[in-house]
Amino acid sequence: MEEMISLIYHGCALASDLELNLSNLANQPIDLARSCDEIAGVFSSARDRLNSTILLREFQQQELLRYRAVDLLQPHLVVPEDSKGTFDIHGVPPESSRMEKMEQPMGGGEDASGSGRASSSFQRPRRRKDDANKRTIRVPAPRMGNTEIPPEDGHTWRKYGQKEILGSKFPRSYYRCTHQKLYNCNAKKQVQRLDDDPFTFEVTYRGEHACTMSSTAPSVPPTSAEVVQTMAQQGTPIQPLVSQGPPISVPLAHWLSMDINHRNIGASDAGTNSNRMVGSGGAGPSTVRLGRENEYQPVADLADAMFNSGSSSNNSMDIIFSSMEDKWDAGDKMN
DNA sequence: TTAATTTGACCCTC
DNA sequence: GAGGGTCAAATTAA
């Protein structure tokens, strides 16, 4: 929120500058138009980010309500076998396997030799397919700023793995609850972009949170009434959210209208060897590649001011400029 | 110093 | 054996 406010302040400052120089720019329509565009862009960015925040909170609230409804209706649901438990924004989650297979000890002692890392007394609980308490939802990715970050969902997560998935363009990220140790919280989630829609994350949750009392948990999301009120104040057209179509239909339409170049992010990174983790190279949180930083700096600074959330290991600017870097790199090799 | 991320390797399920 | 999920050492940022 502070970012957005600073963005608005920045827009105000630009407007003030324009006002002061208005007389000078009166005879320079190109510069004048440029200034107007810049100001409009800043405010548009701030507005869109606000809308995105509102959208996400509304979506989360709808999902929460739906989870509860599913729990109540669970005994009465008949689920197609091929639904695979997918719970997208358009329908009710099948959850056919939910609560069926509870945690069970792994089969007899084995191995304990060879790896040097494995403990003979410890067997990891492993499950696959029909996993207990598995829920899958689809959430829109941020279309501006750092699109690599999955939307917040009310919990804090720690990434513990990332892997190329066969047949998927994008790697799957594995997260566990940050409070796993403190609260013995077994909640986990997997995040993966959809192949056919890079701006949608498929998030699979497993396990239940035992850390709901955590002081770090975010506050309760706003009510629908609050959201509607906010949207009304912003002049956003309001349509029914609950009973017709996807719960995010209203703001999403606006969201999708944003002028973003749809690059096929990460598609070129997809390797063929699926049993290898992927990443940006080098352990630890990665930083923005700084090749050609002198040429990019003004633009990067501006974009940073407008978009950067500052908390991701994969900066979106990296994506934006990677193609240009490639061109330069190719040029360097030619020379 | 602590916490988070990356990533190679291990191990389980299918 | 392939593919997916997890571990844990190395690394980095706060």
Image (tube, coloured by chain):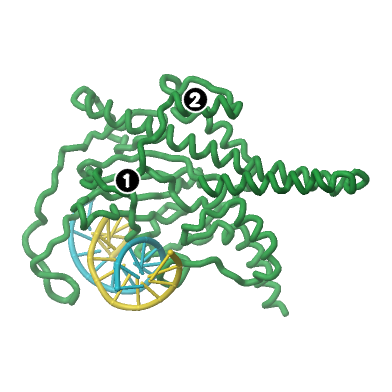
Chain colours: A green, B cyan, C yellow
Classify A289 as above or below A232. Answer: below
Q: What residue is at 59 percent from the left and 29 percent from the top? A: A234
**Judging from the image, what secondary structure is the residue with disc 2 in?**
helix
The quarter of the image holding the C terminus of chain A is: bottom right
| Residue C9 point in image, percent of width and height | 28, 77
Classify A332 as above or below A129. Answer: below
Amino acid marked by disc 2: Val
- Please name the residue that numbered disc 2 is placed on: A228
- Residue A302, picture quadrant: bottom right
Q: What residue is at 26 percent from the left and 42 percent from the top? A: A134
Q: CA distance from mark 1 to mark 2?
A: 24 Å
Amino acid marked by disc 1: Ala
Is A29 or A165 nearer to us in this picture?
Answer: A29
- Please name the residue that numbered disc 1 is placed on: A217
In the figure, is residue A137 to the left or right of B14? right
Q: What residue is at 55 percent from the left and 45 percent from the top? A: A143
Q: What residue is at 55 percent from the left and 49 percent from the top? A: A3
In the figure, is residue A122 to the left or right of A296? left
Q: Chain of mark 2?
A: A
User: Label 1: few (<14), some or many (≥20) within 10 Å?
Assistant: few
Q: Which of the labelled discs sits on residue A279, or is there none?
A: none
Q: Chain of mark 1?
A: A
First in sequence, mark 1 or 2: give its number: 1
In the figure, is residue A21 to the left or right of A190? right
User: Label 2: few (<14), some or many (≥20) within 10 Å?
Assistant: some
| Residue A227 point in image, percent of width and height | 47, 28
Pointers 1 and 2 in contact (CB under 8 A)?
no
Is A139 or A153 nearer to us in this picture?
Answer: A153
